[in-house]
Each structure stands twice: as C-alpha cells, then as structure tokens.
Amino acid sequence: MDNPKPRKNWLIISLQIMLVLAASGYLVFALTELATRPTSDVCKRVDVRIMDSSSAGFITREEIENILNKEKITLIGQPMEQINSEQVQKTLLKNAFIREATCYKSPNGCFNILIAQRLPLLRVMADNGDDYYIDALGKPMGPMGYSADLIVATGSISRNYAKNKLLLLGLFLRDNEFWNDQIEQAYVRTDGSVDLVPRVGSGLIHLGNLSEIDIKFRNLQALYEKVMPTIGWNKYAEINVEHTGQIICKRNKKE
C-alpha cells in the first residue's frame, strides 16, 4: 500500500507557501494603497524637529515659519495632495544655516519637517570688512541678520587663515566648556599670533600661534585655578602662554 505521509507533508508545505504568498501580496497591496491614496483632506498641523537644538544655533520653529512665509508657502489648511514636499525642502535648504532638510507627509494630516543645522563655532569680524560665521568645517556662513553669544574673532583674518588656523581655536573652545565660557574675544595680529580677551579679569591672554593650544590652555588653567583666586583677577595686565614651558605675567600698573 502507498504511504500517504509524504503526500500529507507536501500538502502542508504547499498550504504554508500559499499563506506566505497571500500575506506578502496583501502587504504589498496595503503599502501601495497607503502611499497612493490621499493622506488627508487638508494639512492639520506641521511637526518641526530640529537636531542639536540645544546647541548654539539659529534655526528654530519660528525661523522655519519665517523662511516659508517669505516664500509665500502655506501648509496649514492646504490640501495635502497639493503640498509639494520637494519644493518645501529646496526652500529651506536655501538658508545657509540649514545643512539638511527632510520633508514628508503623514496619513493623519501632518506635514513633517526634520532639520539638521550647520552650527557656527565663532564669528569673524575682520579688519578687511569680512563679517561671517564659520562652522565645524571652517566654511563661512553669512550672518543673515542672526546674532549669537559666540566668541568674536577680530583683526587681520583672511579666509584662508580662518579655515586653516582659527578653526582650530573654535573647535577647541567648542569642546571645552570651561574655556568656551571664559573667552569673549580673539584678536589676530598681523603676524598671525592671537590675543584672547577673557570675560573675567583685566589680563589680556597672549596665546601666540595656534599650535599646541591644548598645552597652552592647560598651563593657563593651572594659573586660573591655583594662583588667580589668591592674588585676584585684576593683578596682571597681560598673561603670556606663547611658550608651552612657561607662563609670563605682566603686572597691572593699577595694582
């Protein structure tokens, strides 16, 4: 007599394959239907998410609204089918402080905007009339009416110097909370050496060139922590840390 067991197994396997194919077909149909049908009659809300919003940036939800309003792009109340996501994205990317913009629609009548910022490190206001911010790549960004509580670099600053030298100072200060709070201004002399204006005390800090700045700031921090609290913050008119092996201090004449 023929053994019915192989035939039974074959029937079970065939049934399983049919169920998988049916489920896959339904999934493809459901996703296609969701993508092609109108997500909602009108746009009910706009969800704006900004990456690194806690950092010193300029892009806020209000600024996103201002950018779109200037281009006469209205989202709330508009038919979702008539909103051009690509057009909104291109409009936002015209702003120098927006690095990436992703725009998409949700089935619940929500238009989503996801923003990645170009965060400025410091502001350059050079003797040659240049006025711009630089980002973490050393690329310039026009002020565009924005202002932020960032270190201002003045003096003899070319675009090449800002990208290849001043950037090092900006990156160091960004990653060091203590010194980022302490330094208010950087002045670049004609020979490329740098003076720093602190927020506390009257002593101008002569940093010299921007090599080995981690060692120079380490030496300076030792002075700040061990000496200055004892003798007072206005004791010196100038603090020179140009040479990594020593600190030279010039007394304030008023002291």
Image (cartoon, rainbow, N blue to C red):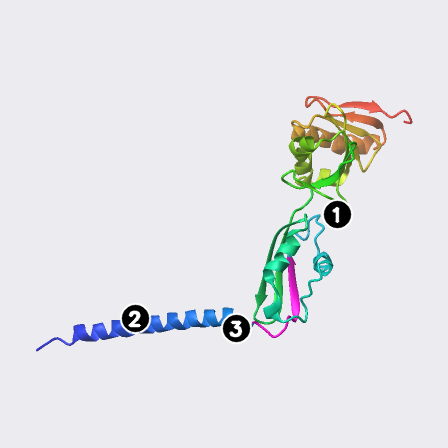
Quarter of the figure that contains the N terminus: bottom left
Q: Which residue is mark 2?
A: 17
Residue found at x 78% / y 26% = 239
Q: Nearer the viewer, mark 2 or mark 3?
A: 3
At numbered mark 3, what does the secondary structure look like: helix, strand or loop?
loop
Other-residue count near label 2 (Cα within 10 Å), few / some / many at <14 / 14–19 / ≥20: few
Seen from the viewer's position, the closer of residues 22 and 32 is: 32
Residues in magenta, as a range: 39-49
What x and y, as percent, mark residue 64? 70, 58
Instruction: Locate residue 8 relative to residue 188 in the image: left or right.
Output: left
Instruction: Locate residue 125 relative to residue 33 in the image: left or right.
Output: right
What x and y, as percent, mark residue 154? 78, 33
Q: Which residue is mark 1?
A: 144
Find the distance from the CA under tag 2 to the CA under tag 3.
30 Å
Type of residue at label 2?
Ile
In the image, farthest residue toward the left: 1
Instruction: Locate residue 110 relative to residue 233 in the image: left or right.
Output: left
* Above or below, comparing residue 85 to residue 196 in the picture: below
Other-residue count near label 3 (Cα within 10 Å), few / some / many at <14 / 14–19 / ≥20: few
Type of residue at label 1?
Met
User: Tags 3 and 1 in contact by the CB under 8 Å rule?
Assistant: no
Q: Which residue is mark 3?
A: 37
Type of residue at label 3?
Arg
What x and y, as percent, mark residue 86? 59, 59
What x and y, as percent, mark residue 21? 34, 71
